[in-house]
Image (cartoon, rainbow, N blue to C red):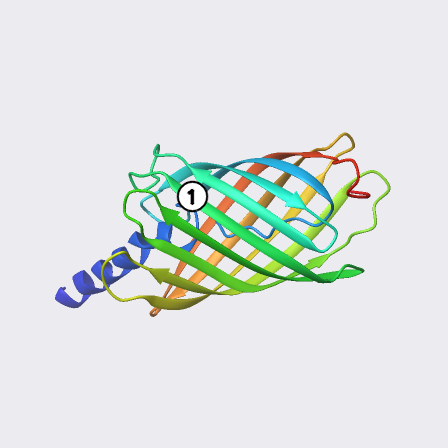
C-alpha cells in the first residue's frame, strides 16, 4: 500500500508540472504556421490527466518570407497558474516545400513568478495540396528547458504534433497534442483553437 501511495504521489507531481511543460500554461507547444501574413489565434488548452486543468490563451503570428514570429498571452484565469504569462517565439524557414522545415524557439515567462520555459527544436510540416483549403499537418520535436526564478534549471525532451486548417477568407482552426518526458512519466496536453489570417500588402502570397 505504501508503494502504491508513493507511485500515486510521483504521478501527481508529474502532472503538476504540466503547465510548465509549455511556454503558456495548459497549452501545447504550437508550431508557428506556414505562410505569409498576420494570424490572430484564440486557444483552449487542457491537460490530459485526472486534474482536468485547462486554460485559455491568445496569440498573434507574423509570417514573413523566411522568418516567422509569434507573441502570446495566457491571462490569469481558469487554471493558468494564478498569473499572467507572456510568450515570444521565432522560426527560420530552411526549406519551404513540398515538406516545410524550419527551426523554432519559444520562450514563456510568468509575469509574477519570473519562471521561464523554453522550447528549441525543428518543425517539419507537410504542404497538403488542396484547391479550397490550406492544410498543414506538422510535428515539432524539441528540447524543453525550465528555468525557475529560484532554484536549478532542468531540461526534458518533448514533441508536439498538430494540424492547421485554413478556409477561404482567412478563417480557420488548429489543434495540437503535446507530450513531454519528465523523469519516468509522460506529461500530456492538448489544445484546439480558431484563427484568422490577414494578408499584409507587400509581404507576398499567403
Q: Secondary structure at mark 1?
A: strand
Judged left or right of residue 39, residue 100 is right
The answer to which quarter of the image holds residue 74 is top left
Q: Identify the image quadrant of the N terminus.
A: bottom left
* Residue 133 on image: x %, y %: 78, 40
- Residue at 18% across, 64% down: 6
Outermost residue toward the front in this view? 202
Q: Residue furthest left?
A: 2
Residue at 51 percent across and 52 percent down: it is 29
Total numbered circles:
1
Q: Does residue 167 appear in this view?
A: yes
Q: Which residue is mark 1?
A: 86
38 left or right of 47?
right
Q: Position of residue 202 (x, y in %)?
A: 79, 40
Corner quadrant of residue 172: top right
* Residue 27 visible (yes or no): no
The residue lying toward the viewer, choosing from 192 and 200, is 200
Amino acid at each position: 500500500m505504501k508503494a502504491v501511495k508513493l507511485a500515486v504521489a510521483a504521478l501527481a507531481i508529474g502532472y503538476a508540472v504540466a503547465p510548465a511543460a509549455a511556454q503558456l500554461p495548459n497549452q501545447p507547444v504550437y508550431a508557428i504556421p506556414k505562410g505569409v501574413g498576420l494570424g490572430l489565434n484564440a486557444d483552449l488548452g487542457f491537460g490530459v490527466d485526472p486534474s482536468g486543468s485547462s486554460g485559455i490563451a491568445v496569440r498573434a503570428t507574423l509570417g514573413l518570407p523566411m522568418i516567422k514570429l509569434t507573441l502570446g498571452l495566457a491571462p490569469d484565469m481558469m487554471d493558468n497558474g494564478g498569473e499572467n504569462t507572456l510568450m515570444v517565439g521565432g522560426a527560420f524557414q530552411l526549406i519551404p516545400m513540398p515538406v516545410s522545415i524550419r527551426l523554432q524557439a519559444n520562450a514563456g515567462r510568468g509575469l509574477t513568478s519570473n519562471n521561464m520555459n523554453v522550447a528549441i527544436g525543428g518543425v517539419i510540416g507537410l504542404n497538403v495540396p488542396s484547391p479550397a483549403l490550406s492544410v498543414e499537418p506538422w510535428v515539432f520535436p524539441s528540447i524543453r528547458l525550465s528555468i525557475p526564478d529560484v532554484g536549478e534549471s532542468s531540461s526534458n525532451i518533448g514533441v508536439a504534433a498538430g494540424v492547421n486548417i485554413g478556409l477561404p477568407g482567412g478563417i480557420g482552426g488548429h489543434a495540437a497534442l503535446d507530450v513531454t518526458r519528465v523523469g519516468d512519466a509522460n506529461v500530456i496536453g492538448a489544445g484546439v483553437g480558431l484563427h484568422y489570417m490577414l494578408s499584409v500588402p507587400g509581404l507576398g502570397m499567403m
